[in-house]
Amino acid sequence: MGIQLSRRGALRSAGVLIVSAGLPVSLDAVLAVREAAAQGVPVPPLPGQLDSYIAVHADGGVTAFFGKIDGGQGLDVAIAQIVAEELDLPAERVQVVMGDTARTVNQGGASNASGVSQGSIPLRNAAAEARLLLVEMAAGRLGVPVAALSVGDGAVFVAAEPARRLPFAELVGGRTFNAEVKWNGRYGNDLNVEGRARPKAIADYKVVGTAVPRRDIADKVFARHDYVTDIKVPGMLHARMLRAPVAGAQPVSVDEASVRDIPGARVVRKGGFLAVAAPREWDAIRAAQALKVEWSAAPAPFPDQAGLYDHIRAAPVTKRAVAMQQGDAPAAIAGAARVIAAEYEWPFHSHSSMGPGCAVADVRANGARIWTGSQKPHAVRDGVAKFLGLRPEAVHTVWVTGPGSYGRNDAGDTPFDAAFLSRELGAPVRVQYMRNEGHGWDTKSPASVQRVRAGLDAGGRVVGIQFESKSFSRTNIATSEADPRDSLASQLMGGGLNPQDTYLFPGDFVPTEPYAFPARLMAWETIPPLLDRASPLRTSHLRDPLGPELIFAAESFVDELASATGADPVDFRLRHLREERDIAVLRAITEKAGWQPRPAGPRGMPGDVASGRGVSLARRDGTVVGLVAEVEVDRRSGNIRVKRMVVGQDCGLIINPDGLRRCVENALVYGTSRALREEVTFDRNNVTSVDWATYPILDITEAPEMVEVVLINRPDIRPTGAGEPAVRTAGAAIANAVFDATGVRLRRGPFTPERVKAAMAGA
């Protein structure tokens, strides 16, 4: 028989553990909890304990412990609604603790739009189990059967005599449930627990599905919200990193005397890792500017940017895989009445978070505490522990709101810098990157080339399609910080590279298009990185990884097929759709947009401004999303103005329609920015897009003038991802609208005025 530890009991007494029969826990875990408790280090919550997810307080309020974080979509509100629903409480009575490794179980952080679709499931089950236990406690106290009781407004009462009631606070408030739940043995997105209770039927929902307002807006607007940059620790030093002017170069000599006049300035160097620290932040900045460094000669690591896509086409393939094969697409295309082919190109993109990365580390003899804006704080805990040679239980990581992440950005590097510097300097250290680092040295989404061919029969129907994507790896740097070998600090110090399988998600390298083509071949090829370590062009996840480029190519190409047959773009898509959900989304957005069927293409409009409309349709992990974009193109300047967007999204059961609508709007604005403005620039030596001037994003004056959101609620389908799917629709819908306005196909992003003018001139 295995044993199950009560972490609450461990916290009450450093040397005393409460154990009970249950799921097996390894001896190492037992010893780790005992050792951590004895040393005063916070004890990680155990996934098999109900108290790890739900607490009822003496005032009747409830706290939900959620092992993910909110990246700005209001996820905490949705979780509060789900927990409140199962406990028959108003949502405002539920507070949500997120991303603290000493208080929450590792649910994988923010990734894959999984906050509600996967992360809410164990919280829902735990809340349902807590409700059952509260009812059973009340039945014993009131002397009535469980079936005679009801729950409402934070109390259990006799249904026939509502005055006979026991508030939650009186039943358990301030104490623990000390109850077990069945854990599935997995950490991360797939973690789940179940108890004896079954969650409510959807038909009985009262809180889920309502528009509960966000909780953070006022504090953010009035500057009361603490960000990771606001964390202060007594005795803290401020640090700045120094980066090589040529990527791959190493410091040959460092003249520490050059910063001797700056109060308290200290230099830390190990291999290529070079930093300065000082008690005052401005002094750290001055020291970074004043420190004299001689850098080694290094060969220029990058090709000319103008030759980027030729480099991708010619680069050796490190791995090729066929992600989907139905029928014999090459044979079908070879025998088709007509063959259509096109290539599409997509650049490197930067996270370009509103603020560069920041972290605070306080490393002591018995452990470490890290404050981070990373979206995966449990991975930071594990990675920093490996980096410093500590047990994971000895590292306490606290997530604090950062300037945004949407994947593995520079927030994933700062904890390693800060932890190493804190250990070396014997004091807490705050590492704050500068703007040029935030843009220049964050991980990038991979540049790529998509090749597409299709065969049409005499009637204009697709008989076969072949889609091949060739790009840098989406996981040259891992999707989380769990392995220090993916950090700039480790790579600069000469640490080994992570031999991870960088091809974990083969299906994501090809478009998740919904069409029922009779034969298709979907394949991807990955090429080596331009620089194998500590590179400013390291590639990793960016919001909706690979979605924007793949759907830009796939849905632009579907439009090209429609145009080649003289068909209306919507009618052509409907002709090749089979699934009801795809058809429903497409019909909903085109009806809302007032779509009038006609073949796409210019209509001979006079004047300097041409208008057009375009459509795109996509899937992402169970979510269906479609977009109609209406644009104006200034023929003189080449500028594209997005006048109206009508977006439809079916992501199963809707938890909070207001939050979902804003989330979809945000995704569209973000996707529009990437399609119209964003492109990492570089020369032979380094990244050159290092600020907002050299890496412009969509500003408020350029945002779509009108965004209309059509939500399709599917109570019979569990919630699927909502935060990322709409991002992938913008590029193709806008490009298709430009073709409708001008007759010009845009096959390379971003669609800058210069690029549009050149395309029109060459048409």
Image (spheres, rainbow, N blue to C red):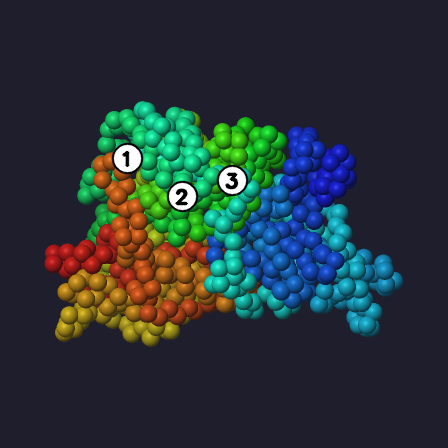
Question: Disc 3 vs disc 1: Cβ atoms closer than 8 Å?
Answer: no
Mark before the other along the chain sequence, 2 or 3:
3
Residue at x 24% of width, y 56% of height:
751
Mark before the other along the chain sequence, 1 or 2:
1
Mark before the other along the chain sequence, 3 or 1:
3
Q: State whether residue 731 is above or below residue 281.
A: below
**Mark nearer the viewer, 1 or 2:** 2
The location of residue 742, given as percent across then percent down, is 18, 65
Question: Disc 1 vs disc 2: Cβ atoms closer than 8 Å?
Answer: no
Q: CA distance from mark 1 to mark 2?
A: 22 Å
Residue at x 53% of width, y 31% of height:
426
Between 532 and 298, the one nearer to me in the picture:
298
Residue at x 37% of width, y 61% of height:
668
Between 716 and 49, the one nearer to me in the picture:
49
The location of residue 418, given as percent across then percent down, is 48, 37
Looking at the image, how many numbered discs can be counted on the residues?
A: 3
Q: Amino acid at mark 2?
A: Trp
Q: Is residue 435 left or right of residue 142?
A: left
* Residue annotated with mark 1: 245
Residue at x 55% of width, y 52% of height:
118
Question: Disc 2 vs disc 3: Cβ atoms closer than 8 Å?
Answer: no
Between 231 and 317, the one nearer to me in the picture:
231
Tell me the quadrant of the picture where the C terminus can be found: bottom left
The location of residue 248, given as percent across then percent down, is 31, 30
Q: State whether residue 256 is above or below residue 214.
A: above
Residue 157 numbered tag: none
Q: CA distance from mark 2 to mark 3?
A: 14 Å
* Residue annotated with mark 2: 282
Tell me the quadrant of the picture where the N terminus can be found: top right
Between 263 and 732, the one nearer to me in the picture:
263
Q: Amino acid at mark 3?
A: Met
* Residue annotated with mark 3: 236
